[in-house]
Image: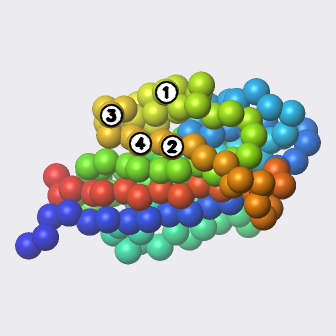
C-alpha cells in the first residue's frame, strides 16, 4: 500500500489597477493587484489545486466555482482551510509543499518568510514544510510584460 501521493498545481491571474496584491495570504504593497472573482491569490490557488490533484479530486473550480456569488471576493485562505479539511477527512496530511511564484515585479523576497508562516498557520503545519520561491520571467511573454503573475506548486501528501 503506497502511503504517499503527489499533486501539482498551476494558476495565473491578470494584473490590474485598483486591486490588492495578495500572495500566500499576505498583502504586498504594489501599484497593481491581481484580478479575479476571489482575492485572486494565485499562489494559494496553485497550492490548493496541487492538494486536490494529489488525491485526484479535481480542481478548485469544482469546489468554489467562479459562477457562485458566495465566493466573490473570497479570502483564499478560507478556501485553503476548506481544502485542507477535505484531505484530512480522507485521511491525508501534507508532507511538504514546494512552490514558485513567477512575477516580474514587485520583488517578493522580503515577503516570502511571512507567506510561509501564514500558509503554515492555516494548514497547521510547520513553515519549514512550506517552500516558496520567486522568480521573474526574464521580461518574456505576458508575465514578463507585467500583465499577470503565475504560480506553480507541488504538494506531497502522507497518509495520516
Ligand atoms: Mg486562480
Closer to the chain start, of discs 1 and 4, is: 1
Q: Could you tell me residue 132's position as x and y percent?
A: 48, 42
User: Does residue 153 appear to the left or right of 157 in the view shown?
Assistant: right
Do residues under tags 3 and 2 come within 8 Å of each other at their CB atoms?
A: no
Q: Could you tell me residue 105's position as x and y percent?
A: 75, 40
What residue sits 16% from the left and 52% below the top? 160
Q: Is mark 1 on a helix, strand or loop?
A: helix
113 and 121: which is toward the camera: 113
User: Does residue 13 appear to the left or right of 123 in the view shown?
Assistant: right
What residue sits 15% from the left and 64% below the top? 3
Q: Distance between the residues labelled 1 and 4?
A: 10 Å
Q: Which of marks 3 and 2 is in front?
A: 2
Q: In this view, does 9 lie above or below 129?
A: below
Closer to the chain start, of discs 2 and 1, is: 1
Look at the image and tell me whether residue 141 can be seen: yes
Q: Is mark 4 on a helix, strand or loop?
A: strand
Label 2 near ligand 1 (CB < 8 Å): no
Q: Distance between the residues labelled 2 and 4?
A: 7 Å
Mark 4 crowdedness (10 Å alpha carbons): few <14, some 14-19, many ≥20: some
Label 4 near ligand 1 (CB < 8 Å): no
Look at the image and tell me whether residue 148 can be seen: no
Do residues under tags 4 and 3 come within 8 Å of each other at their CB atoms?
A: no
Q: Name the residue under label 2.
A: 133
Q: Name the residue under label 4.
A: 131
Closer to the chain start, of discs 3 and 2, is: 3
Closer to the chain start, of discs 1 and 3, is: 1
What residue sits 58% from the left and 31% below the top? 109
Q: Mark 1 points at which residue?
A: 113
58 and 67: which is toward the camera: 58
Mark 3 crowdedness (10 Å alpha carbons): few <14, some 14-19, many ≥20: few
Image disc number at residue 128: 3
Q: How far apart are marks 1 and 3 (CA)?
A: 10 Å
Amino acid at each position: 500500500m503506497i502511503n504517499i501521493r503527489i499533486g501539482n498545481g498551476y494558476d495565473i491571474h491578470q494584473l490590474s489597477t485598483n486591486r490588492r496584491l495578495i500572495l500566500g495570504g499576505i498583502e504586498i504593497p504594489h501599484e497593481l493587484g491581481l484580478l479575479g472573482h476571489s482575492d485572486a491569490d494565485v499562489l494559494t490557488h496553485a497550492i490548493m489545486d496541487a492538494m486536490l490533484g494529489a488525491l485526484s479530486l479535481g480542481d478548485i473550480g469544482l469546489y468554489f466555482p467562479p459562477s457562485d456569488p458566495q465566493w466573490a471576493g473570497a479570502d483564499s485562505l478560507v478556501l485553503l482551510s476548506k481544502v485542507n479539511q477535505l484531505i484530512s477527512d480522507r485521511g491525508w496530511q501534507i508532507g511538504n509543499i514546494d512552490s514558485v511564484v513567477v512575477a516580474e515585479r514587485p520583488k517578493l523576497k522580503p515577503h516570502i518568510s511571512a507567506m510561509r508562516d501564514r500558509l503554515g498557520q492555516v494548514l497547521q503545519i510547520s513553515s519549514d514544510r512550506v517552500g516558496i520561491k520567486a522568480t521573474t520571467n526574464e521580461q518574456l511573454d505576458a508575465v514578463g510584460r507585467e500583465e499577470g503573475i503565475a504560480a506553480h506548486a507541488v504538494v506531497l501528501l502522507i497518509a495520516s
